[in-house]
Amino acid sequence: MSDNRPIGVFDSGIGGITVLKALRAALPHEDLVYLGDTARLPYGTKSPETVTAYATQATKHLMEHGVKMIVIACNTASAVAIGPLTEALKPLPVIGVIEPGAKAGVGATRSGHIGVIATEATVKGGAYARAIHALKPDAFVSQAPCGLFVTLAEEGWVSGDVAEAAAKRYLAPLFRGKNAPDTLVLGCTHFPVLARTIKKVVGKDVKLVDSAATTAKAVQAALADRGLGAKRRGKGKTRFLATDSTERFARVGGIFFGEIIRAKDVELVDIRPS
Ligand code: DGL
């Protein structure tokens, strides 16, 4: 069996491009449609109801592109909306990034003390702690919200004085003392671009993990299980949609993607209900 329809991927902005990049590498023959809800970023400071409404509108829009699967490339939306989205879109597979991120954290820790940094909404909902404990009941989880990292990433300020000062302010309390975490889960898809700055603060012995590679694996497995993999010889296409600021999306998104994204290749879409 095969299925050449695209895979729909969405985030509040360009952060999810860190997941898109891993998907592109793992699934070269698949067509991918990425939607960044740049008009309404950030999601991480909003209520679960608002994030669920936005995520529902994003997936509805992706459905119009005839997608065969949805990847929620946003921890905040995964944390609060994966249940309602999975239910509403059945039997379409919906893959979030929390379980893959938890799996990466559990796989990396030796001491069993796992740090999680994420948006305020993700931390508040406790989805990471639940996902980690489901895999490793004796794990000790320390969490810290780091909302400003989203803004820094969107601004492209991923290193230098400002990024380092923010990293110190957020992370120093978590890594003070002897019993600090040995693993840090970057529980927001915007954070991997700040990895070098974060590492400077937490030290080289702390393992940084994120959900990009493990999510790509989960998507690969879901495609294989359901016989939904594309059958084509050439490379799959990557299509970009944004709800605002397409030029900015292209400019900063290209850094996340590791490839030039041309502004004229980013389509402006309105996903608000009419
Ligand atoms: N990139 C998103 C996440 O993984 C959210 C960033 C935001 O919009 O606050 O949580």
Image: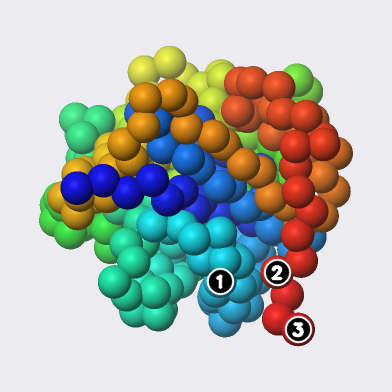
Amino acid found under the numbered disc labelled 1: Lys
The answer to whether residue 126 is visible is no
Pointers 1 and 2 in contact (CB under 8 A)?
yes
Q: Under 8 Å from ligand 1: the CB of mark 3?
A: no
Amino acid found under the numbered disc labelled 2: Ile
Q: Which mark is residue 72?
A: none
Res. 68 image quadrant? bottom left
Q: Which mark is residue 60?
A: 1
**Tag 2 secondary structure:** loop
Tell me how far mark 1 sits from mark 2, CA to CA.
8 Å
Tell me how far mark 1 sits from mark 3, CA to CA.
13 Å
Residue that appears at 69% across and 50% down: 241
The residue lying toward the viewer, choosing from 228 and 146, is: 228
The x and y percentages for residue 154 are 74, 40
Q: Which mark is residue 271?
A: 2
The x and y percentages for residue 6 are 46, 48
The residue lying toward the viewer, choosing from 132 and 252, is: 252
**Tag 3 secondary structure:** loop
Q: Which mark is residue 274?
A: 3
Amino acid found under the numbered disc labelled 3: Ser
Q: Under 8 Å from ligand 1: the CB of mark 1?
A: no
The x and y percentages for residue 172 are 55, 35
**Quick check: 173 above or below 178?**
below
Earlier sequence position, callout 1 versus callout 3: 1
**Quick check: 165 above or below 141?**
above
Pointers 3 and 2 in contact (CB under 8 A)?
no
Circle 1 residues within 10 Å: few <14, some 14–19, many ≥20: some
The residue lying toward the viewer, choosing from 30 and 204, is: 30
Tell me how far mark 3 sits from mark 2, CA to CA.
9 Å
